[in-house]
Image (cartoon, rainbow, N blue to C red):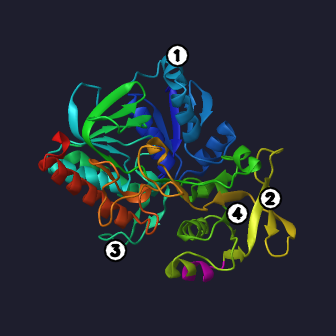
Amino acid sequence: MAQVEFYTREWCGFCTQAKALLDHKGVEYREIDVTRDLALQQEVMERSGRRTLPQIFIAGQSIGGWDELSALDDRGELDRMLADAGAGGTADAAPETDEVRNMIIVGSGPAGLTAAVYAARANLAPLCIEGKQAGGQLTITTDVENYPGFPDGIMGPELMILFRKQAERFGTEFVSSDATRVDLSQRPFVVEVGDKVYRSRTVVISTGASAMALGLESEQKLLGHGVSMCATCDGFFFKGQKVFVVGGGDTAIEEATFLTKFADQVTVVHRRDELRASKIMQDRAFQNDKIDFLWDSEVIEVLGVEENKVRAVRVRNKKTGEETEHECGGFFVAIGHKPNTDLFKDQLETNDVGYLITKPDSTATSIPGVYACGDAQDHVFRQAVTAAGTGCMAAIEAERWLEAGGAEG
């Protein structure tokens, strides 16, 4: 029996991230794909007591999913557990050296990986600190229908795999861990990943944004027990059930539409009286008999903490103040995103929300040689294609700055 067992499914972004971390450490594991196997789906629920993927077991012990795996790694406990189980060692794709690189890219969504493609083709030999959430938000996205070149659409995780392969083909190096500290006050710039230190003449920031939670205590307690941030990963656990989705933008409506493949009924809770989603997404939702709406409302509690599984949600009407309970088996949160820019706080200029500010018609930040692209910088469009475009801009601007001797000045 393998010492590490890994329950996964097709196009599960969190599964991809967990596998990347284990692969990065050189861990051998048994992958159990439950996508088309009802018996295995039941097995993972019974063994883990959870309705979310991935689920990971080390020496027969359930350690949870991606969040728990990542937290164990952050605390330095994962390596010990793997060693105790005889499950393999650690590895690093880009060992620390005294070398000063031409470019370090922090982040690996469409922006960062496009920057990597352009930089690598320009012989800048970029190092991409892709982070534990490699691939960014698209790894937990369902069908991507508006990215050029895919007339039939493509799953978000698949698209990001293709992005990464292309960057790797041209010689980009990758580190599958999070940058823990960045020092832009000295030259060359310093990027730290744990106890490893990397130095570079330029830095491209493409750290993206992260999904926000409602902040309810019950929401956190039931995460993985009926509360989910990823319909693609967890939707099939809710076959024949009634589920709720909170949000009103493209992400929420996309999740709701996807969930109708499994759930009998999907209710969208939105705090306004009209959606913010694109017209085509709205039309699909309104025409889907499985989707209904609670307008001018907010979820104030997820019920089921005592039973350790979602059984209902409590909703308040914002206009009347009336509170009602609605039975459901699942609750999906899709209320927006927050830029991942805390690493650069007090070093780079940001707006009030935390988005990095760049010069007009440029990705250049307030520090020469440092460029920002994608959702860490773009609070207006926030699309995969625009992120890729700004990633291209950042790489070209950095290359021109280096050619002009900027790093020597």
For the residue carrying disc 3, how many other residues have a C-alpha within 10 Å: few (<14), some (14-19), or many (20+)? Answer: few
Say which residue label 4 marks.
243
**248 horizontally vs 74: left or right:** right
Label 1: which secondary element: helix
**44 horizontally vs 127: left or right:** right
Among numbered discs 3 and 2, the one appearing first in the sequence = 3
Q: Is residue 9 visible?
A: no
Q: Are marks 4 and 3 in contact (CB under 8 Å)?
A: no
Real-space Cα separation, disc 1 to disc 4, in angstroms: 40 Å
Real-space Cα separation, disc 4 to disc 2, in angstroms: 9 Å
Among numbered discs 1 and 3, the one appearing first in the sequence = 1
Residue 353 placement (x, y as % from top left): 54, 57
- Amino acid under label 2? Ala
Q: Is residue 79 visible?
A: yes
Label 4: which secondary element: strand
Residue 254 placement (x, y as % from top left): 54, 68
Among numbered discs 1 and 4, the one appearing first in the sequence = 1
Indicate which disc residue 84 carries. 1
Label 2: which secondary element: strand
Say which residue label 2 marks.
312
